[in-house]
Image (spheres, grey):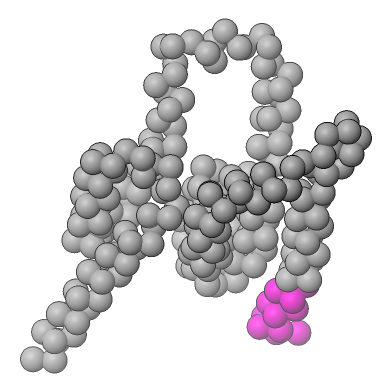
Amino acid sequence: MNEKAVSEAYNKKTHVIGRIVTALTLIMLLAAPFLIGGVLGAMPDLSAVGRAFLSVGLVWTVSSVVEFLIYTPMLGAGGGYLAFITGNLINMKIPCAVNARDMVGAKTGTPENEIISTLSIATSSLVTILVLAVGVLLLAPLQPVLQSPVLQPAFDNVVPALFGAMAYRYYRRNMNIALTPLVLMSVLFILVPGLTGSTSFMIIPSGAIAIAIAYVIHLKKTKEAAQ
């Protein structure tokens, strides 16, 4: 069996397992409130759930679709299923997968990237579970330290620091493409602080700006090469 046939067989089995596990995960997530409510005799108010979904759910639905379209090509089938099932993509899974891919020099869309993404996200998920278990056990003893006003600014800036360090590696390679959306989004978030809670949704306009700039640069280079 050649490499292409092996890759196709692997992807086919991955999709079968991934869809089954995703469906089971959705069922368990949706059934949990009703199961707990039935046991405790406090069923959720479906009308209140519907109103809450209409107020915030529609925005997050768009954000979820955008994240799926952006992250799935980066992670591949196996990594994509693992990441979306275990969650915490922006804070943990995406940085881990991107860093692992860069370390081995794998390219997006290749079988190597598929394997590296799956292994890195699986490792990240296991480490996360281990850290959470240790954190739960030490929560009470460490509570005074974690709630210290001195450390609070550090906790508030973990994600920006993480993505800032990672983003610089890509910005310096294509500064002429990255600079404009970076400046525009920074100014926008400063002027409208409320948008910080819609970071995933703001990927759409910032990504569109970057694509437009890259397209203009490509046309310019093509025109210069033709002369």
Q: Does the magenta portion include 102?
A: no
Residue occupying image coordinates x 23% and y 62%: 177
Q: Is residue 100 visible?
A: no
Location of residue 144 by image quarter: top right
The x, y position of residue 211, in whole percent, is 30, 70
The x, y position of residue 28, in whole percent, is 81, 50
The x, y position of residue 85, in whole percent, is 69, 53
Location of residue 215 by image quarter: bottom left
Instruction: Say whether residue 162 is left or right of residue 121.
Output: left
Q: Name the quadrant of the N terminus.
A: bottom right
Depicted 112 relative to depicted 154: above or below: below
State the extent of the magenta-drawn residues as a range: 1-13
Residue occupying image coordinates x 70% and y 41%: 126
Instruction: Say whether residue 142 is left or right of residue 193.
Output: right
Q: Name the quadrant of the C terminus.
A: bottom left
Q: Is residue 218 visible?
A: yes
Q: Residue furthest right?
A: 39
Q: Does the magenta portion include 10?
A: yes
Instruction: Say whether residue 194 is left or right of residue 113.
Output: left
Residue occupying image coordinates x 31% and y 47%: 168
Q: Nearer the viewer, residue 105 or 197?
A: 197
Q: Residue furthest bottom?
A: 226
Location of residue 37 by image quarter: top right
Q: Nearer the viewer, residue 18 or 96?
A: 18
Magenta region, main secondary structure: helix
The x, y position of residue 13, in whole percent, is 78, 72
Depicted 183 relative to depicted 71: above or below: above
Residue occupying image coordinates x 66% and y 37%: 128
Q: Residue furthest left?
A: 227
Q: How many marks?
A: 0
Q: Residue furthest front?
A: 47
